């Protein structure tokens, strides 16, 4: 439907051309013919001439349209393939598989055009005669397939609900570059917030972040790209390939995959800020000094595109940029592609690398960051009375989502099942949450309904909890309204130890959530020393205790309901 507006004019023109010329021969403008013997012979010759010229016109029209269609394919790429969507509204479902050598095929005008594809006009006389010819066959052809398609339209094929599971995880973070090391550091309550070393930030009121100190692209990204790409793309490519490796998709397995049904949907909130900033600085000298890759490497979608090119995956490929909710939008959208049958495997998540002067300065200008420079490890303190803003982080998180039967067929290890989710908007303020957490509450309720999970079965929530004055409390209110009657509920904040990873936050915290499901242990929320009076301490101070998970939700803005199972239970 997205391309209907682009393709409909072409379809309308093609049909209108046939109908107009068909009607032209029915106007009765031909000169009368005598009814004598000579007149009867002349009438037969004229009728035969009209038949031939009508067929000649159709042959020219079909081939000319076919040539036009080929140029449109080259220009719009997938635009013409959506012509079937438009035509199906008219009962032409057969248009979904068009070929360049025959734009219409058998499905658009039916069987009657099979013998006309190679015909051409026989000269100017036949062309002039064709303008007056009665093309009754052409208009009959337009109507006939509609009846056949009408019968097919009423026959719906029964489809089995496709289930989505997680079979691979990859990440890059200040707490380690693999899920196990990352979660072990979380369980010990270790803070990854330290002083910034990448650039001189002495003049900034905030001089610390969840900065990645050691990171190498060796073995993951080609050297020529590693020197040119923004760090957000390097994190994305590395985490994406690690997720593929973690899913046990080797070169041999890759050969057997249907690459047209393997896609990449990894987003970024900020994109290539460093590359774009460098381009502006170069432009101050001369445009000749600008990096020719500065525009593509600054866009948020290029990371997904580069990863797809490396893997040869030709399925859905794009990015979503929705600030803190970027990863969750990507994961839910990727799961929907699998549920609808458009893909069998999807890499999804987010990546950001905004710990650079312009990124730090921008958030300082918003007065959103903590300024606890004397003790960075205690700066991120969700729900604590002494919190004074969030702490920036960086990195990438990628999940490999896969259709259940596809995963079972190749013997993949299944970490969790994706059950559903929801999109909502506060519609309240650019940065401040709704005073009563209305958007979050609505999202939770819709996610539970869509996934079929009862709120009493939810015993763990990995919260957004950024350590901001307004955000933490409004989220708490929404959680209490949604789950307040559940005594088993445990809530924690991963950001207390790694900071706010912006567009990558949702995916990295999804990995923490899945690791909690797998291990049965939840990590603590550190620095919660003096909780807000509105906060129920028993429900929010999470310590490393074993839990048996039935289900879990992950916030914010989009909620992902996951279900953990032992591997053998899938067999």
Image (cartoon, rainbow, N blue to C red):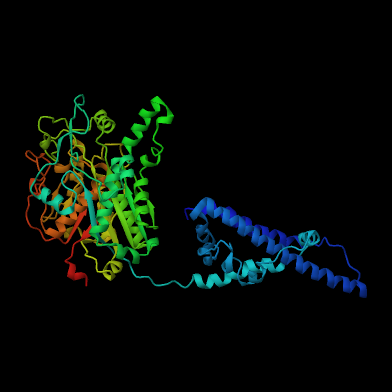
- In the image, residue 295 lies at what x, y percent? 40, 38
Compare residues 287 and 481 and report the one nearer the observer: 287
Query: Which residue sits at x=56%, y=53%?
Result: 72
Position of 153 with respect to 355 (left or right) is: right
Residue 331, can we see it?
no
For residue 500, above or below residue 423:
above
Residue 146: tell me if it is visible: yes
Q: Position of residue 148 (x, y in %)?
A: 56, 72
Q: Nearer the viewer, residue 471 or 568?
A: 568
Q: Residue furthest bottom?
A: 37
State the count of labels.
Answer: 0
Q: Quadrant of the C terminus?
A: bottom left
Question: Taking 75 as reference, is 450 above or below it?
Answer: below
Frontmost residue, 22 versus 511: 511
Is 302 above or below relative to 7?
Answer: above
Left or right, residue 87 beside residue 472: right
> 253 or 505: nearer the eye?
253
Q: Quadrant of residue 284?
A: top left
Residue 43 pos. (x, y %): 85, 71
Q: Could you tell me residue 140's position as x and y percent?
A: 66, 69
């Amino acid at each position: 439907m997205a391309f209907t507006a682009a393709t409909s004019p072409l379809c309308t023109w093609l049909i209108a051309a046939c109908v107009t010329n068909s009607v032209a021969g029915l106007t009765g403008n031909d000169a009368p013919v005598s009814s004598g013997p000579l007149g009867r012979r002349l009438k037969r010759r004229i009728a035969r001439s009209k038949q031939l010229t009508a067929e000649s016109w159709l042959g020219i029209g079909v081939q000319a349209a076919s040539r036009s269609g080929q140029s449109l394919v080259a220009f719009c790429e997938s635009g013409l393939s959506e012509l079937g969507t438009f035509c199906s509204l008219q009962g032409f479902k057969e248009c979904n598989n068009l070929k360049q050598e025959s734009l219409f095929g058998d499905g658009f005008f039916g069987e009657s055009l099979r013998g006309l594809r190679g015909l051409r006009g026989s000269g100017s006389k036949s062309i002039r005669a064709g303008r007056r010819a009665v093309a009754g066959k052409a208009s009959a052809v337009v109507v006939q397939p509609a009846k056949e398609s009408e019968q097919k339209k009423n026959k719906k094929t029964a489809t089995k609900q496709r289930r989505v599971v997680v079979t691979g995880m990859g990440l890059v973070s200040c707490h380690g570059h693999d899920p196990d090391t990352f979660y072990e550091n979380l369980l010990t309550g270790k803070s990854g917030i330290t002083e910034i070393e990448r650039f001189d930030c002495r003049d900034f009121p905030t001089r610390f972040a969840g900065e990645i100190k050691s990171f190498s692209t060796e073995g993951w990204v080609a050297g020529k790209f590693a020197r040119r790409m923004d760090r957000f793309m390097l994190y994305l490519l590395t985490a994406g390939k690690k997720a593929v490796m973690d899913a046990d998709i080797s070169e041999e397995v890759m050969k057997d995959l249907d690459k047209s049904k393997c896609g990449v949907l990894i987003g970024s909130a900020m994109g290539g800020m460093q590359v774009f900033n460098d381009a502006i600085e170069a432009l101050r000298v001369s445009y000749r000094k600008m990096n020719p890759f500065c525009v593509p490497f600054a866009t948020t979608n290029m990371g997904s595109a580069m990863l797809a090119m490396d893997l040869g995956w030709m399925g859905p490929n794009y990015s979503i940029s929705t600030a803190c909710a970027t990863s969750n939008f990507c994961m839910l959208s990727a799961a929907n592609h699998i549920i609808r049958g458009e893909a069998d495997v999807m890499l999804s998540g987010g990546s950001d690398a905004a710990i650079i002067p312009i990124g730090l300065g921008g958030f300082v200008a918003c007065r959103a960051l903590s300024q606890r420079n004397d003790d960075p490890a205690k700066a991120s303190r969700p729900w604590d009375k002494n919190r004074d803003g969030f702490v920036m982080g960086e990195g990438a998180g990628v999940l490999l989502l896969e259709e259940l039967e596809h995963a079972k067929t190749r013997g993949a290890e299944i970490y969790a099942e994706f059950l559903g989710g929801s999109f909502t908007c506060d519609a309240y303020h650019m940065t401040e949450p709704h005073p009563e957490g209305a958007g979050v509450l609505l999202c939770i309720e819709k996610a539970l309904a869509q996934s079929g999970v009862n709120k009493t079965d939810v015993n763990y929530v990995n919260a957004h909890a950024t350590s901001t004055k307004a955000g933490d409390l409004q989220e708490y209110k929404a959680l209490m309204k949604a789950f307040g009657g559940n005594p088993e509920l445990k809530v924690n904040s991963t950001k207390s130890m790694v900071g706010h990873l912006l567009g990558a936050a949702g995916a990295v915290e999804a990995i923490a959530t899945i690791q909690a499901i797998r291990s049965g242990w939840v990590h603590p929320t550190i620095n919660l020393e003096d909780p807000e009076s509105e906060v129920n301490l028993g429900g929010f101070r999470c310590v490393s205790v074993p839990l048996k998970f039935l289900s879990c939700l992950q916030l914010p803005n989009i909620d992902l309901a996951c279900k953990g199972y032992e591997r053998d239970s899938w067999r």
